[in-house]
Amino acid sequence: AKMQKDGIPGNAITYSSLIVAHARKGALERAEAWADHMLKVGVPGDSVSYNTLIFACAKAGESERAEIWFNRMHSLGLKANSFTYNGVMAGCARAGKLDRAEKWWNRTRDAGVEVTNATYHNVIMAAV
């Protein structure tokens, strides 16, 4: 609000900062509200904002919400990396959804994204 009063438009960096700050405090709804506002004013965001949202959803066990943010990121043409895919799989693991984690494992490999130790960890955690 202060930036707007001063005539400084928000950009991907400022919105990502707001999203990260709220996500770190565990305020997922506020982080998502800022992301929605960012999109509403025509700022597409960047990988930091979407990866942050995906991991905040994962931490909250909200795997479906993590997938929604992944899909929004993808629809905007932003490139997902291993961190992005691992975030979605972490949400599946936390929610105990092995079938979804395996689906995302396959999507990771199909996209040609590097499979990392975290990728294996997330699938294993979904299985136990």
Image (cartoon, rainbow, N blue to C red):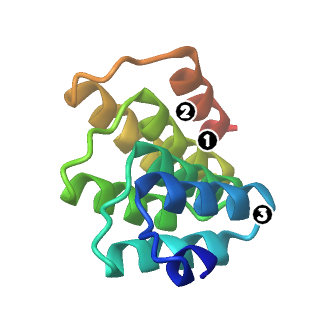
Q: Earlier in the sequence, mark 1 or mark 3?
A: 3
Q: Can you give x and y, in whole percent of width and height, for residue 37 in the image?
A: 44, 79
Residue 7 position, x and y percent, is 46, 77
Q: Which residue is mark 3?
A: 26
Q: Nearer the viewer, mark 3 or mark 2?
A: 3
| Residue type, mark 1 in image | Ala
47 vs 43, nearest the viewer = 43
- What is the quadrant of residue 33 in the picture? bottom right
Residue underneath mark 2: 123
Q: Badges 2 and 1: C-beta atoms under 8 Å apart?
A: yes
Element under disc 3: loop
> Can you identify the residue that label 1 sits on?
126
The amino acid type of the residue labelled 3 equals Gly
Gap in Å between the C-alphas at discs 3 and 2? 24 Å
**Residue 58 placement, left or right of 78:** right
Residue found at the far right of this picture = 25
User: Badge 1 local density, few (<14 within 10 Å), some, or many (20+)?
Assistant: many
Three-letter amino acid code at the position of disc 2: Val
Q: Position of residue 80 (x, y in %)?
A: 33, 38
Left or right: where does residue 47 sit relative to residue 29? left
In the depicted view, which residue is nearer to us: 29 or 97? 29
- Callout 2 crowding tier (Cα within 10 Å): few <14, some 14–19, many ≥20: many
* CA separation in Å, label 1 and label 3: 22 Å
